[in-house]
Image (cartoon, helix red, strand yellow):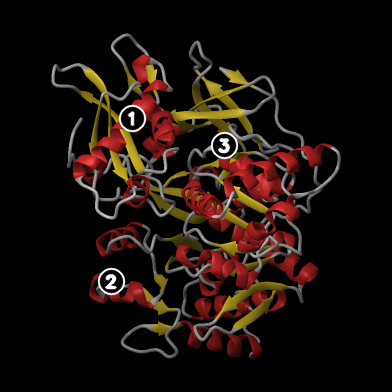
């Protein structure tokens, strides 16, 4: 195994041991600063201070305790909103267990999670109410965020808050005095992972507190920052930054109305920070480059601008606003930092955004690790590496091959308690030394910089023992604008020999533009993709070359963080033309 030293912190932090202490600290330090800026349905904006936020947590928690729900398991299934954050923090600040649930799941999956987790109450929005059958959730109290009054057996969130305020003013203090055990189960997240089988990840408050503190030791966010919440909050990747890091730093949180409204929302809220996945950045980057290309001499000016900005930075001149002010304004004019992870990203995107004056911190995390463990911190600007471990995290490459590629394993206070009601699965991933085996393959260089190579379960092993990482080929394919998505896998060819194959979903708009015509035939699409595959094959060793591909006309089924669900049967079904 390869195991290197831990990263040293370079920012001082304020310790805290549980999430109630975090909120009390935030109210004391940043009480009259805005914790949230929320856009109403009529377009008006209203603001919630940290003092108001903590008071509403106490009111909602007091109402829940009055209902006999102290230390109960409570779920949330809704779009990102202030009420989502308030509900989550209320449950954990009272010592209960929160069960964040993907609102895009089918009704049967939601029933299954609520039953398995023994949930007593579900916070939801109107879209979830339309999806579910209340008779299937007997024993589960439903609370709707946008419902003004209790009706049809569903409680109103606003009415519950009003009740809590009355109880507090009447001297009710049991919620305020609830004891918090940082080592007890606090958050239960069900993730399909890569196996297609849902596992419940058990996290305690100590996991989150330590992940926040060690992140803040190497990443600077301050009270002047404003974060735009875009990714689903039921993912730890988004929720750790929005729910915990923002209050720790006294920053303000706003909510994106949907990806297609992202740039409009950025101009409305003027955010400085947001969390993203590569797919979002790739889409935005592609649109920006197209807009640049469409202008007279735009591409030439863009290249010259990047070169001059790079040269100027070496002598202390910041020319980014001179050349890229228009792009900066598209992000609201104040964007400085994007925290990105969940999948590989084209290094050129990182270079270009840096030229625009927007730093991308590319990192690596897992739900089982609360989630962040490795990141390009404030002192790293590596385009191809995921960075170095957080302070407090031990990382190693287990059982490396001759190229130094092995499984990434991590150990630290943010590693989960285990899988819910599944001791066997827990033992499979957490060894006797406390290292969590991520299932991801990677390597590390002499400077302690880590690189992802692929998933261990996805590796294609050739007859002569060569390893092929599908993610590498998918990355090469993704660099072509005419490819929307791809899934590379190993299968038998017509002669029964192992072969590298790919399902490819074309970007039909890009193909139409490339060919200069509105209507394109299946044959023309296949020919364009054939050229892409040939160029990809020229960029890799012979044994890695794609020998057959299929054109997929439907989009792949993905997770809510835009990752293809590799083992879903529907994603592996062949369709269209084969080559």
Q: Which mark is first along the chain, 2 or 1?
A: 2
**Toward the viewer: 72 or 436?**
436
Q: Residue at x 32, y 85 (%)?
A: 153
Q: Quadrant of residue 271?
A: bottom right
Residue in the picture at 59% in, 49% down: 297
Above or below 487: residue 94: below
Q: Which mark is residue 131?
A: 2
Q: Quadrant of the N terminus?
A: top right
Quarter of the figure with the C terminus: top left
Nearer mark to the viewer, of 2 and 3: 3
**Residue 268 or residue 167, whichever sits in front:** 268
Circle 3 or circle 1, nearest the eye: 1
How dense is the environment of label 2, judged by Cα within 10 Å: few (below 14), some, or many (20 and up)? some
**Residue 363 falls in image quadrant:** top right
Residue count near mark 3 (Cα–Cα under 10 Å), binned few <14, some 14–19, many ≥20: few
Name the N-terminal-most of marks 2 and 3: 2
Whole-percent x and y of residue 111? Answer: 29, 63
The residue at which mark 3 appears reads as: 347
Which one is in front, 35 or 114? 35
Residue located farthest toward the right when viewing the structure as drawn: 315
Q: Would residue 180 be seen by someone viewing this image from the given angle?
A: no
The residue tagged 1 is: 533
Q: How far apart are the two marked residues, 1 and 2, measured between alpha carbons?
A: 42 Å
């Amino acid at each position: 195994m390869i195991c290197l030293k831990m990263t040293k912190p370079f920012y001082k932090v304020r310790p805290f041991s549980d999430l109630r202490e975090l909120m009390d600290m935030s109210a004391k330090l940043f009480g009259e600063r805005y914790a949230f800026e929320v856009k109403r349905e009529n377009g008006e904006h209203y603001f919630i201070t940290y003092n108001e936020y903590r008071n509403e947590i106490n009111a909602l928690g007091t109402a829940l305790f009055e209902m006999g729900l102290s230390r109960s398991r409570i779920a949330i299934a809704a779009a990102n909103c202030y009420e989502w954050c308030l509900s989550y923090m209320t449950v954990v600040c009272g010592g209960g267990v929160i069960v964040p649930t993907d609102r895009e799941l089918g009704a049967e999956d939601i029933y299954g999670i609520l039953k398995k987790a023994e949930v007593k109450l579900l916070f939801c929005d109107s879209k979830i109410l339309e999806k579910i059958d209340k008779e299937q959730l007997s024993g589960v109290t439903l609370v709707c965020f946008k419902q003004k009054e209790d009706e049809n057996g569903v409680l109103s969130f606003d009415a519950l808050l009003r009740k809590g305020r009355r109880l507090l003013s009447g001297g009710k203090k049991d919620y305020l005095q609830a004891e918090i055990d940082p080592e007890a189960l606090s958050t239960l997240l069900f993730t399909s992972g890569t196996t297609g089988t849902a596992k419940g990840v058990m996290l305690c408050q100590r996991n989150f507190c330590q992940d926040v503190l060690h992140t803040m030791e190497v990443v600077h966010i301050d009270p002047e920052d404003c974060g735009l919440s875009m990714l689903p909050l039921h993912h730890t990747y988004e929720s750790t930054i929005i729910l915990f890091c923002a209050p720790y730093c006294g920053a303000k949180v706003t909510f994106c109305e949907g990806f297609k409204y992202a740039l409009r929302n950025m101009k409305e809220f003027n955010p400085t920070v947001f969390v993203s996945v590569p797919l979002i950045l790739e889409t935005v980057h592609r649109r920006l480059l197209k807009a640049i290309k469409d202008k007279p001499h735009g591409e030439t000016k863009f290249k010259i601008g990047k070169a001059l900005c790079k040269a100027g930075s070496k002598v202390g001149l910041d020319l980014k606003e001179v050349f890229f002010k228009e792009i900066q304004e598209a992000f609201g004019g104040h964007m400085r930092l994007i925290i990105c992870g969940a999948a590989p990203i084209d290094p050129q995107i990182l270079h270009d955004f840096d030229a625009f004056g927007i730093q991308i911190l590319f990192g690596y995390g897992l739900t089982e690790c609360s989630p962040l463990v490795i990141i390009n911190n404030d002192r790293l600007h590596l385009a191809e590496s995921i960075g170095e471990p957080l302070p407090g995290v031990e990382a190693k490459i287990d059982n490396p091959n001759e190229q130094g590629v092995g499984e990434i394993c991590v150990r630290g206070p943010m590693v989960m308690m285990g899988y819910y009601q599944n001791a066997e699965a827990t033992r499979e991933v957490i060894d006797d030394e406390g290292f969590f085996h991520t299932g991801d393959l990677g390597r590390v260089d002499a400077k302690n910089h880590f690189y992802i190579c692929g998933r261990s379960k996805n590796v294609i092993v050739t007859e002569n023992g060569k390893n092929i990482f599908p993610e590498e080929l998918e990355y090469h394919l993704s660099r072509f604008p005419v490819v929307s998505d791809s899934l590379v896998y190993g299968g038998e060819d017509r002669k029964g020999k192992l072969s590298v194959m790919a399902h490819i979903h074309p970007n039909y708009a890009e193909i139409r533009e490339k060919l200069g015509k509105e209507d394109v035939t299946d044959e023309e699409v296949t020919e364009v993709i054939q050229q892409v595959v040939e160029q990809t094959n020229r960029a890799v060793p012979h044994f890695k070359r794609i020998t057959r591909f299929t054109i997929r006309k439907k989009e792949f089924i993905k997770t809510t963080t835009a990752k293809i669900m590799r083992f879903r049967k529907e994603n592996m079904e062949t369709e269209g033309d084969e080559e």
